[in-house]
């Protein structure tokens, strides 16, 4: 017996109906009417413009331009940004549920989508009014692509070890160095680059700049070949004495570390939402495939395994929404609290995909069913935006400090 390509890939009504069926009242109860409206909008756009392209993007490695443009046209790229910059001024919960929907349809598209926000957000929190007006609207409407330039060949999670250097000049700074594993780095129009003005100062030397991809001395490398996320490009960035005007300083000199730490709160919501969305996608695709094979009488062993996954996915959704709500309401949320969400939800995405492939048996690795794509796409979410090992370190340190305070 064979299973043709699932109807949810080609029929938007079937896609929406299945994911509506899988919504959980316990999670929906945490959402406002506006947040449910945004989720419905995202699901509709994904069903028509994103999910039908996902398999082909994975096969061809074509950049997810059309899918991202559809999301931007629907106003989804500016959810947490103010109206005067082209946004809608919604909550982080709204952003989380939209990210979950996009990830369930095409994780690679969600990676490009979230990187637009990751590039715009540091400008919002640390940029001058002029920088905000110059760069944020284009990132939100999709006319410009953005990248976040943090990771280097020898400095990833330890941002204080950056070697990309900004040297003061008469007109601003001269930027030299290399970045790696940069999402959309090969085509970025707007790059938020973190560099040091003095390595001896450690974190206190880290400074943030807004750099345009077309400037002299700025060059993007060829995209890497990757296990997953094929519709999103990942590349190196090279800076060779690139002149940065004084007006493109982001925040204050030597205060880039605080920009990084404020930004990762949003980026880790993104990764966590990807984890939940990928878990949902693997579950939905497995359920659809088993129904095609067995009708309403799915064997007990597979039914029991699906029941376990349903519970785990609900827990992940609740955690994602609860922490996103905390970000909306609590300015003192800690790295450990964010880390619990990021680590748990991204582990959920990978582990659910592995289990879904096991449940399907010989059908689990068929590319047209899409479960093996979920597995490949989910793996990187455990690595970027702070590896899950780093998240465990942050969580553990925070717990240990709390016990010392108790003693």
Image: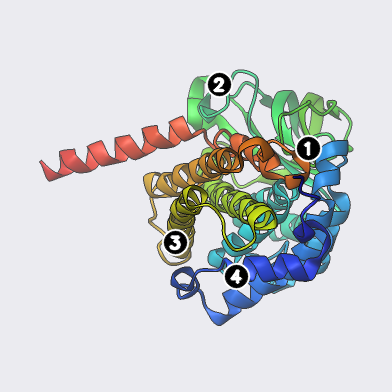
Give the foreground label among 3 and 4: 4
Quadrant housing residue 117: bottom right
Q: Is residue 322 above or below residue 196?
A: below
Q: Residue at x 70, y 47 (%)?
A: 107
Residue 288 locus on image (x, y percent): 66, 57
Residue 105 locus on image (x, y percent): 72, 55
Q: Is residue 81 left or right of residue 307?
A: right
Q: Which mark is residue 40?
A: none
Give the foreground label among 3 and 2: 3
Residue 367 locus on image (x, y percent): 76, 39
Q: Spatial distance from mark 3 to mark 4, Cα to Cα?
A: 17 Å
Q: Residue at x 78, y 26 (%)?
A: 224
Give the foreground label among 2 and 1: 1
Assess whether mark 2 and mark 3 are in contact (beta carbons under 8 angstroms): no
Assess whether mark 2 and mark 4 are in contact (beta carbons under 8 angstroms): no
Secondary structure at badge 2 equals: helix
Q: Which mark is residue 21?
A: 4
Q: Spatial distance from mark 4 to mark 2, Cα to Cα?
A: 54 Å
Mark 1, Cα crowd under 10 Å, few <14 / some 14-19 / many 20+, is many
Secondary structure at badge 3 equals: helix
Q: Which residue position holds label 1?
A: 230
Q: Residue at x 88, y 40 (%)?
A: 62
Q: Which residue position holds label 2?
A: 199
Q: Which residue position holds label 3?
A: 318
Single out the residue that lies furthest toward the left. 407
Frontmost residue, 397 versus 302: 302
Q: Is residue 216 above or below residue 290?
A: above
């Amino acid at each position: 017996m064979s299973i043709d390509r699932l109807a949810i890939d080609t029929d938007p009504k079937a896609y929406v109906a299945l994911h509506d069926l899988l919504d959980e009242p316990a999670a929906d109860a945490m959402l406002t009417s506006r947040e449910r409206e945004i989720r419905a909008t995202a699901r509709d756009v994904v069903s028509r413009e994103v999910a039908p392209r996902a398999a082909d993007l994975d096969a061809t490695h074509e950049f997810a331009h059309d899918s991202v443009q559809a999301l931007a046209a629907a106003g989804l790229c500016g959810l947490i940004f103010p109206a005067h910059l082209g946004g809608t001024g919604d909550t982080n919960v709204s952003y989380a549920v939209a990210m979950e929907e996009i990830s369930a349809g095409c994780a690679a598209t969600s990676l490009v989508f979230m990187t637009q926000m990751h590039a715009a957000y540091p400008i919002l929190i640390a940029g001058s009014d002029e920088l905000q007006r110059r760069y944020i609207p284009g990132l939100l409407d999709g006319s410009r692509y953005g990248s976040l330039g943090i990771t280097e060949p020898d400095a990833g999670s330890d941002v204080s070890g950056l070697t990309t250097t900004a040297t003061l000049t008469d007109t601003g700074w001269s930027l030299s160095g290399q970045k790696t594993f940069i999402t959309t780095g090969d085509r970025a129009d707007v790059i938020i680059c973190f560099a040091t003005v003095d390595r001896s100062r450690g974190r206190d030397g880290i400074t943030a700049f807004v750099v345009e991809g077309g400037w002299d001395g700025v060059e993007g490398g060829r995209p890497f070949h990757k296990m997953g996320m094929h519709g999103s490009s990942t590349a190196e960035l090279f800076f060779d004495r690139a002149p940065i005007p004084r007006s493109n300083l982001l925040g204050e000199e030597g205060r880039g570390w605080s920009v990084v730490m404020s930004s990762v709160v949003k980026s880790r919501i993104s990764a966590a939402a990807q984890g939940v969305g990928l878990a949902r996608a693997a579950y939905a695709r497995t359920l659809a495939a088993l129904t095609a094979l067995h009708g309403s009488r799915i064997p007990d062993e597979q039914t029991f395994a699906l029941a376990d996954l349903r519970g785990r996915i609900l827990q992940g959704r609740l955690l994602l929404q609860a922490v996103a709500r905390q970000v909306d309401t609590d300015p003192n949320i800690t790295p450990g609290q964010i880390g619990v969400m990021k680590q748990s939800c991204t582990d959920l995405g990978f582990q659910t995909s592995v289990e879904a492939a096991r449940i399907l048996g010989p059908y689990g690795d068929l590319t047209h069913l899409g479960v093996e794509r979920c597995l490949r796409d989910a793996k990187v979410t455990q690595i970027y935006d702070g590896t899950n090992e780093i998240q465990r370190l942050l969580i553990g340190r925070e717990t240990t400090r709390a016990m010392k305070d108790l003693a």
